[in-house]
Amino acid sequence: MTEFQPRVFSGVQPTGNLHLGNYLGAIVNFVALQQSHDCIYCVVDMHAITVWQDPKELSRQIREVTAAFVAAGIDPVKHIVFNQSQVSAHAELAWIFNCVARIGWMNRMTQFKDKAGKDKENASLGLLAYPSLMAADILAYKATHVPVGEDQKQHLELTRDIAQKFNNDYAESIAEHGFGDAFFPLTEPLITGPATRIMSLRDGTKKMSKSDPSDYSRINLTDDAEAIATKIRKAKTDADALPGETDGLKGRPEADNLVGIYAALSGLSKQDVLNQFGGQQFSAFKPALADLAVEKLGPIGAEMRRLMADPGHIDQILANGALRADAIARPILDGVKDVVGFIRRK
Ligand code: AQP
């Protein structure tokens, strides 16, 4: 069996306000994995334009996600932070994967169905092919582990399908070129951490999302203390007191979500939180949650604002990261081209 060196890759789209869901579902894990793995964290700007983005806003948002990474504790010197469009291997490998993946696979993706809505014919071709580019992002580095939130599980499964089909379709050539019995690893999703699915503050059955038109549905990493407190105060809840046991959260999505957020931010289990707040009304719980959120997110927001004041420094971080990412991806892409039978400049 071909052995693959452990390597972590993940990305975040610069499509709007980074929120608590992105933070607890993804970024907290990105930070933790730095202790045990070589990590590559990417601002996936090419994914962002699968849906129209205002060019000036896009540049600002690329810098903002970068600032969030660094402010949250990602070390761009020991690890790699860059934006996707600066490393052409992503686009090149995505094309090859477009020819490996099947249209039927893409049509089944729930994210495509959700984002394309009823007017599928009018969605961009890029939106349909999104998972193929995502597979390229990961496999351009032969990454073995990908930390993501629950919503990305289906795309990660597709990445494994693409890797498997490439390994099978080109098995003979892979062996002939000395790559053993598999060119790509079957990447493992890491859907762990304090909260893999944070829900909207306005509707406990919908995930917290950057593209939700209501800003009250999410807590942004750049929100100040007042905005955080207001959003939590206005968060939808039911009329009952908090239960004493986690079983009592069943069928109460909004209560479950707020207790989950408290647990994730404090490093406690939901049961610990209920031991403390069980029997109390939301009017008592919400201010405690707001204080905790301000305490945890306030310093990150402040550091993001400080970093954003110097865009040149952020661009330098991205340029350095891109050079180092390219140095890893380039030989892997060369190997792919040899396996496929392309002739390349040597
Ligand atoms: N609500 C969430 N709970 C937990 N994790 C989440 N993630 C996103 N929303 C939640 C995780 O954050 C990482 C980066 O997400 P992304 O920006 O690349 O993709 P996304 O899923 O499209 O994010 P949004 O916020 O929902 O944006 P829109 O509204 O544009 O679709 C991923 O690991 C994701 O799982």
Image (spheres, rainbow, N blue to C red):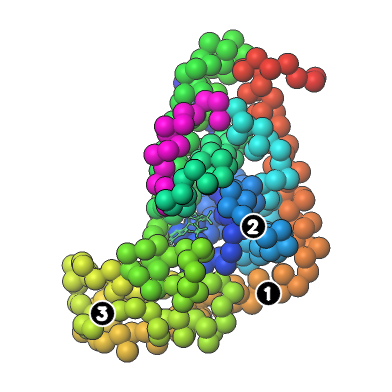
Q: Is residue 201 magenta?
A: no
Say above or below: 100 vs 314.
above
Amino acid beneath label 1: Arg
Q: Which residue is mark 1?
A: 305
Q: Which residue is mark 3?
A: 238
**Does the residue at mark 2 contact the one at mark 1 (Cβ under 8 Å)?**
no
Q: Which residue is mark 2?
A: 53
C-alpha separation, residue under disc 2 versus residue under disc 1: 22 Å
Q: Is residue 329 visible?
A: no
Amino acid beneath label 3: Asp
Going 75% across and 56% down the picture, which residue do you hit? 317
> Where residue 178 sits in the image (x, y, percent)?
60, 14
Say above or below: 231 vs 190.
below
Between residue 111 and residue 26, name the one nearer to us: 111
Q: Say which element carries label 2.
A: loop
Q: Say which element carries label 3.
A: loop
> Where residue 62 sits in the image (x, y, percent)?
67, 59
Q: Quadrant of residue 346?
A: top right
Going 62% across and 51% down the picture, which residue do you hit? 49
Q: Earlier in the sequence, mark 1 or mark 3?
A: 3
C-alpha separation, residue under disc 3 versus residue under disc 2: 37 Å
Q: Quadrant of residue 342?
A: top right
Mark 1: few, some, or many residues within 10 Å (few <14, many ≥20)? some
**Does the residue at mark 1 contact the one at mark 3 (Cβ under 8 Å)?**
no
